[in-house]
Amino acid sequence: MTTTASEPTTTDEPVRRGRLLDLPGVPSLPVLAVVVTVLLWASSFVVIRSAGEQFSPGPMALLRLTAGTVVLVVIALRYRRPIPRGRALGLVVGYGLAWFAGYTVLLNWAEQHLDAGTAALLVNFAPILVAVFAGLFMSEGFRRPLVVGIAIAFVGVVTIAVGGSGGGANDSLGIVLGLITAVLYAAGVLMQKVALRTVDAVTATWVGCFAGFLALLPFSGAAISEVSQAPVSSILAVVYLGVGPTAIAFTTWAYALTRSDAGKMAATTLVVPAIAILMSWVFLGEVPTIFGFVGGALCLGGVWRLRRS
């Protein structure tokens, strides 16, 4: 979300509806932003699983955020929005450390112990946490369509979890890491939602990503060493993670989040596991079980229901 040149954004007044992603006569643009976000985030589980054969968790996270930061800084220079200050800056840095840095490292680590579909399932327990906390502490409440949609999608997640996603053996360490990742994801969404009251989407995204990048610099030595030994395909995969699921998806997510409740937006991402399982089947040969198909259909149905609220 951005402002016009004559109405600069400050941390002392609410952010106005902007035109960075707005097109006249296209009221469904926020929905398009959600679709882009969901598809890119789903693809990240598959790409991480593949690139994890060449890169360890910390270095891969640093390389991903390096690529993402470069793209986001270029965009930020184009739109020249002021850097937030005070409490707003603290919130942006906080969600950057939790979501960009901590989440990324732990997800990479988890996917060394889990198939892509199971990792997506565990991580996307986060929308349930977000919806509950946003309803309790951010005055978003619990509207019936939201509750019904979450319930249907959650049944879908449980169905896939019970039957397995078909990707092979998973161990307890991976499950624990996946759940911790979900907590960081939820914390990041909640901090970001508050920050976006006074910070535009592009600024919130690039500053948060940059904060995560700085936090991961201790992995730079290992990252350089691993890049020198990795095939070009793996390097390009990590660059994709930075450009697509990070720079583009986090920006479209922030744009949509400014135009929706945190609980409703987070619940939309419950469809990610279903898409990730399908992608892992196509690209990694991790064939889903019948439970995966049924659970995926329930996830899609739940998201359709809540989007009608």
Image (spheres, rainbow, N blue to C red):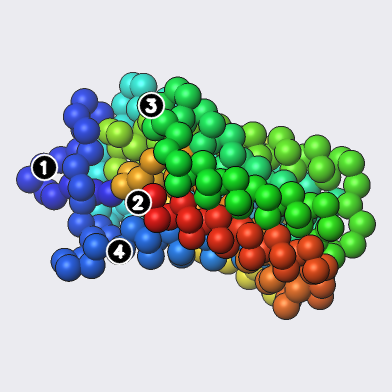
What residue is pinned by disc 3? 139
With 22 as the anchor, is 238 left or right in this view? right
Task: Give the amino acid at mark 2.
Answer: Tyr
Q: Residue at x 76, y 57 (%)?
A: 160
Q: Nearer the viewer, mark 2 or mark 4?
A: 4
Mark 3: few/some/many CA within 10 Å (<14, 14-19, 20+): few
What residue is pinned by disc 1? 7
Q: Earlier in the sequence, mark 1 or mark 4?
A: 1
The answer to the question of whether label 2 and label 4 lie on touching residues, with beta carbons closer than 8 A, is no
Q: Earlier in the sequence, mark 2 or mark 3?
A: 3
With 289 as the anchor, is 145 left or right in this view? left
What residue is pinned by disc 4? 28
Mark 2: few/some/many CA within 10 Å (<14, 14-19, 20+): many
Question: Looking at the image, which is closer to me, 282 or 248?
Answer: 282
**Marks 1/2: CA distance?**
18 Å
Q: Nearer the viewer, mark 2 or mark 3?
A: 3
What residue is pinned by disc 2? 255
Q: Residue at x 61, y 58 (%)?
A: 299
Mark 4: few/some/many CA within 10 Å (<14, 14-19, 20+): few
